[in-house]
Amino acid sequence: MISLPFRRTRRTPNIDALYGMIVAQARSEVFYRDYGVPDTVEGRLDMIVLHLVLVLRRLADGQTQWPPMGQQIFDRFCRDIDDNFREMGVGDLAVPKQMQRVASAFFGRAKAYGAALDGGEGRSLDEIVARNVFGVADPPLGAGRLAAYMKEAAQRLDRQPIEAVTDQGPDFVDPAAVPTPTRSS
């Protein structure tokens, strides 16, 4: 048998399904209607990134066999965003620059969200969500609710066996069930 010099990585058949579940959750109208997430291209991208970070965080949780699947899901995300830029009319020469911007935003958010979810020092998850999703420094109630959603979703995913995440999909929290936090003055 002749070995080809450039092998494609074998894609697990459920990568598209897993990515589809992430996108479907991110598109839940509750986030835009009740949480106040901006219903814009940027707002929707932020919600996909947020959910992608939650799933990739779970897949990377101390498991050496799952990072290839996480990489495949991330690659699927990149293909999707690239396709969307092209559909929106972004020129071929501008797409790589836009993709670089998206990758930078993804990795920055992944680091910030991960640190906040893991209880690290620094800004609170409310502040990080306010800045990244809502574009403001002072966390609105929607940012607090979205941060509470993220914490519940992360805890729920942490309790879900990795095999269940990869075989059946992430068991996300119903965003409508997360109460709006009250401001303590």
Image (spheres, rainbow, N blue to C red):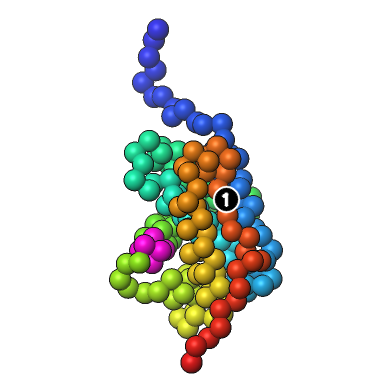
Is residue 116 one of those drawn in magenta?
yes
> Outermost residue toward the bottom?
185
Q: Which residue is mark 1?
A: 171
Mark 1: secondary structure: loop
Query: Visible in this render: residue 133?
Result: no
Q: At 39% from the left edge and 41% from the top edge, which residue is drawn?
A: 67
Query: Visible in this render: residue 148?
Result: yes
- Dominant secondary structure of the magenta stretch? helix
Q: At 56% from the left edge and 61% from the top edge, which residue is drawn?
A: 47
User: Relative to 185, is 114 above or below?
Assistant: above
Residue 33 in the image, given as x and y percentages of width and height: 69, 71
Indicate the amino acid at tag 1. Answer: Asp
Residue 181 in the image, given as x and y percentages of width and height: 56, 78
Q: Quick one: 150 or 33, which is closer to the camera? A: 150
Q: Quick one: 38 or 4, which is closer to the camera? A: 38
In the shown orientation, is residue 5 left or right of residue 170?
left
In the shown orientation, is residue 68 left or right of residue 73?
left
Is residue 154 one of those drawn in magenta?
no
Span highlighted in magenta in the image: 112-118
Q: Quick one: 38 or 167, which is closer to the camera? A: 167
Residue 89 in the image, given as x and y percentages of width and height: 62, 53
**Quadrant (top left, top right, bottom left, bottom right) of the N terminus:** top left
Q: Quadrant of residue 64?
A: top left
User: Relative to 92, is 176 above or below?
Assistant: below
